[in-house]
Structures are given as structure tokens and as C-alpha cells.
Image (cartoon, rainbow, N blue to C red):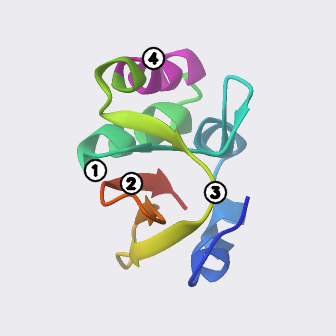
Amino acid sequence: MKLSFILGAALAPFLLAPAAAIEVAVIYEGFPGYAGCKERADMQRVVDLADQYDLEAAREIIRRGLKSKDCRVLGGDIIVEVVPPFSRLVKVHMRGDPDAYWIIQ
């Protein structure tokens, strides 16, 4: 997976995130990529649940989002749009796709 702009630097705090959050964020049920949601609140809920080590509930949010098309697994050339300070979320889009998604950094 190729990541553009400063995603590598943006993911530096990723190493400090709990392993549960990393598992949900990077690989969703065997699909390599970043699980991302259009609504920041949805991804924040994933982070909160993963921090509580309730991976099943965190995955359920992603499952529901995939079904409703509010979330998706991102891959390919990912462009960083916003890296809010003091946040564990990053706003990104895939090259050629105007829709933006929040992922866990």
C-alpha cells in the first residue's frame, strides 16, 4: 500500500496506540488496508471501544458502516488532508476519490 504526503510521519503516534486499536485500524477481517469512516464520531467510537479492548463492538461499527457505505477499507494511494493536533484520527482520501474518511493514526 502506497501512502502519500506525510502519512508516515502522521502515523508516528500510532506506535503508542493500544494494540487493539491498531488491529481494528489497519486490518479489518483479513482485508489489508485502513478501516475508515466518513464521520469522525464513528471512528472515535471505534477508538473508544478498542481502548476498552472490546474488539467485537469496534468491528461491529465498521461492519455496519461497510453495509451502509459510511465506512470502507482504504488502500492504494492515500492522501492526508487533516492531522488534527492531539487527536488519534487523521482525515484522508484515496487518490481519484473525492470522499474523505477518518482513520486511526
Q: Quadrant of the N terminus?
A: bottom right
Residue 10 locus on image (x, y percent):
57, 76
User: What amino acid is labelled 4 in the image?
Assistant: Glu
Compare marks 2 and 3 and give the one earlier in the sequence.
Answer: 3
18 or 11, which lies in front? Answer: 11
> Mark 1: which amino acid?
Arg
Q: Nearer the viewer, mark 4 or mark 3?
A: 3
The answer to whether residue 39 is above or below residue 89 is above
Specify whether residue 17 is in view.
Answer: yes
Q: Is residue 54 left or right of residue 76?
A: left
Label 2 element class: strand
Q: Position of residue 27 (x, y in %)?
A: 69, 37
Q: Which residue is mark 1?
A: 40
Q: Quadrant of residue 67?
A: top left
Q: Amino acid at mark 2?
A: Trp
Q: Which residue is mark 2?
A: 102
Mark 4 and mark 3 lie on one chain; the one further toward the N terminus is 4
Residue extent of the magenta highlight? 55-64
Residue that numbered label 3 is attached to:
76
Q: Earlier in the sequence, mark 4 or mark 1?
A: 1
Residue position for label 4: 60
Helix, strand or loop under label 3: loop
Q: Secondary structure at mark 1?
A: helix
